Amino acid sequence: MATTAGTLPAVGAHSGLWSWLTTVDHKRIGALYGVSAMAFFIMGGIEAILIRTQLAVPNGTVLEADRFNQLFTMHALTMIFLGVMPLGAAFFNWFVPLQIGARDVAFPRLNALSYWVFIGGGLLFVSSFIFGGAPNAGWFAYAPLTSERMSPGSGMDFYVVGLLMLGLSSLIAALNFAVTIINMRAPGMTMMRLPVFIWMTLVVAFLLILSLPVLTVALIQLLFDRSFTTHFFSPEEGGNPILWQHLFWVFGHPEVYILILPSFGIISEVLPVFSRKPLFGYAAVVFAGVSIAVLGFAVWSHHMFTTGLGTVPQIVFSASTMAIAVPTGVKIFNWLGTLYGGNIRFTTAMYFAVSVIVLFTIGGVTGVMHATVPVDTQQQDTYFIVAHLHYVLFGGSIMGIFSGVYYWFPKMTGRFLHEGLGKLHFWLFFIGMNLTFFPMHFLGVGGMPRRIYTYDADLGFDTWNMVATIGAYIIAVGMLAFLWNFVRTMRQAPSAPNDPWGGATLEWATSSPPPEHDFDVVPEVHDRDPLWYNRDHGVTTPAAPAHLHIHMPPPSYYPLVLGGALLLMGIGVLSHLAVTALGVVIAIYAVWAWTLEPTD
Amino acid sequence: MAAAGAHGVAHHSTTGIDNRKLLMWIFLASECLFFGSLISTYLIFKGKSLVGPYPDEILDIPVTSISTFVLLMSSLAMVLAVYGAEHGRPRMMKLWLLVTILLGLTFLGFQVYEFRTFGHEGLNLATNQFGASFFVLTGFHGTHVGVGVLILASLLLASFRRSGLGREAGFHVEIAGLYWHFVDIVWIVIFTLVYLIPQ
Ligand SMILES: [Cu+2]
């Protein structure tokens, strides 16, 4: 639907495998992120289904204990690092430039690099199932369980190397988006006119930039413990296993917001558009998002109440954790205020967005419950925590991400997902997730511990486990409905107009899907809801000149080469250091060639 | 075209700061947390070693003071290189780039010497918590110095092309300088906390 087809010089080939391998176009990289992350999301779902099948009945025999440990570890790692985070990245890629009125991100080739490093890390993770067993010590990998002696296989080595690569990928992407948002805004797009989705992206970027290095240090120390004879975390040699927990959760708690804030951003776009009124209390939503992030760095020890921190730290971390409920509550009331009195359209995207408010609130309330130290002492390591975290991560993150999928699908592909199938998908997800995770509250309070691979029949766990498993299968059917919807839609001809929903933000000012250069004329912004302002004040966008001379960065294969080199370095750590040396040599060559490659 | 983001001095950007410079600043913020975690680990394990050698038996403050002085002087040389690059004096730039590189390599030489001496005196990664946290901290700092030397050497090499470092010579050297000074400042912190403050 590019309105200017034929007037622009072709920039490299536009289709074919090679064009995808060398693309630096933020929309194509976004598509790559989206499709790969969906594939990983399904993989993580299959792992969940296996877990739930094993736990459906007492003394289940579907999985053995070690395989079960691998599956719950990989389920968490897959969903967090290969599913939800890259699905967020897919939307960042697609909509950061479009919503701020830029033609691409600040560093298009770095953008491609972050994708290729992500794929490398993901493949490394997944391949661990074949090469001697996946990581099996939980995604938090508590010491000293991860020591060479306790975890002799290669699973935890895959964990270290895979996470180092995925962290590098996220860091590169975060730096890129931070610079893009700060520095590439269209004229008139002030910080307080940025769409909330962009604000949340910026907050997530800084959370990643400031928390990933801490995880990196923890992983390096674990790597040294396992491979280079140090004893950072082994207590018998003077090491300190609690140090791991501190370092891990200094990253791990901000990570929770890294997972949820993209979803908050998405529904802050969807709710106003389908209520046909501006977001209620924009500034409050923005500042709430920022204060969640700042507070998020001061609460990590609430994951460690049972390690014997001492009374004062416990009180401090308990109070700071509860304090986060305040800005979160501000957001929830602002969303409700947006709905209130609105002329609401019940699209699938709106269904998902409204469900986030409900489900996240449930998860938030249980979160405040175990912010209380004595309550947490009871609930630690029980299914109550599993219920809490899935209400936040499934009910909050995943439902919000699917809201974004339905909302932006016409912009991304020029096609509409079928609304009927979409609502079927929604109800299967909504009913399925509540059936799966609500009973886990009861199981947890009833004393069922997390991460046990089976349980006895006379403990009172049978009924709710069966219900939870049925719920998990309903979620799986919902996912099939989505996939069917996706395939069916992609086989139709594009039919979406520029602005099918009456959107307020700049991405709806260009064609669906947008041309490679995004905007024929870089838009000028006069208001927080630029398109609504233009509509109400009769501002028309200037017509595109007959001949566009827009220079877009040419494709490059160096991101792929450098990504491959980093993968080699990782593989070397797992096999032979000579491979790492080869990776270093190729990486230095790739960086050199990258720097000297002309981009004009 | 701003999106290309790699050439042309007069880039349009919302803040007026060049994208690449902003990238470097934010990256250095991330690096602060990286070294912060390594230094915290060192401090947490201070006095927790079960067996010797202990820091006060083995750290050689006079020798490391010299290497610290060398690294500090390299920052001075770096400033002069940036000045030369920004004021269209390529020979001055090349000279001081070379001096910075040599001083950086000298610092690394001191570190190799220090590591070897400690090794002979029975301290390695496995010996005790001091060894583990000391070698990992200073080792990663040394790696950063090494990367800095590679960057500066690349610039020096590229400056001998017919076109030199191009119109943006000053800018490129300045960005490299940001990184170099940061690594230098981190060393000042490490030197103070690890060597100077009594055990
Ligand atoms: Cu937390």
Image: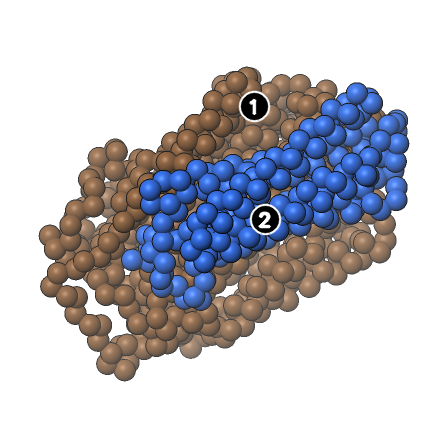
Chain colours: A brown, B blue
State the residue position of label 1.
Answer: A573
Q: Which residue is mark 2?
A: B77
Label 2 Cα crowd, 10 Å radius (few <14 / some 14-19 / many 20+): many
Q: In the image, what residue type sits under mark 1?
A: Val
Image point (23%, 81%), residue name: A538
Neighbours of disc 1 within 10 Å: few (<14), some (14-19), many (20+): many
Q: Nearer the viewer, mark 2 or mark 1?
A: 2
Marked residue chain, label 2: B
| Numbered disc 1: secondary structure | helix
Query: With A294 as the anchor, is B157 left or right in this view?
Result: left
Q: Amino acid at mark 2?
A: Ala
Q: Chain of mark 1?
A: A
x then y, percent, for residue A321:
70, 58
Which residue is at the far bottom?
A537
**Residue B43 against residue B134 in the figure, above or below:** below
Q: Is residue A475 positioned above or below A161 on the image?
A: below
Q: Nearer the viewer, residue B74 or A126?
A: B74
Query: CA gap, disc 2 to disc 1?
Result: 37 Å
Q: Nearer the viewer, residue A500 or A359?
A: A500
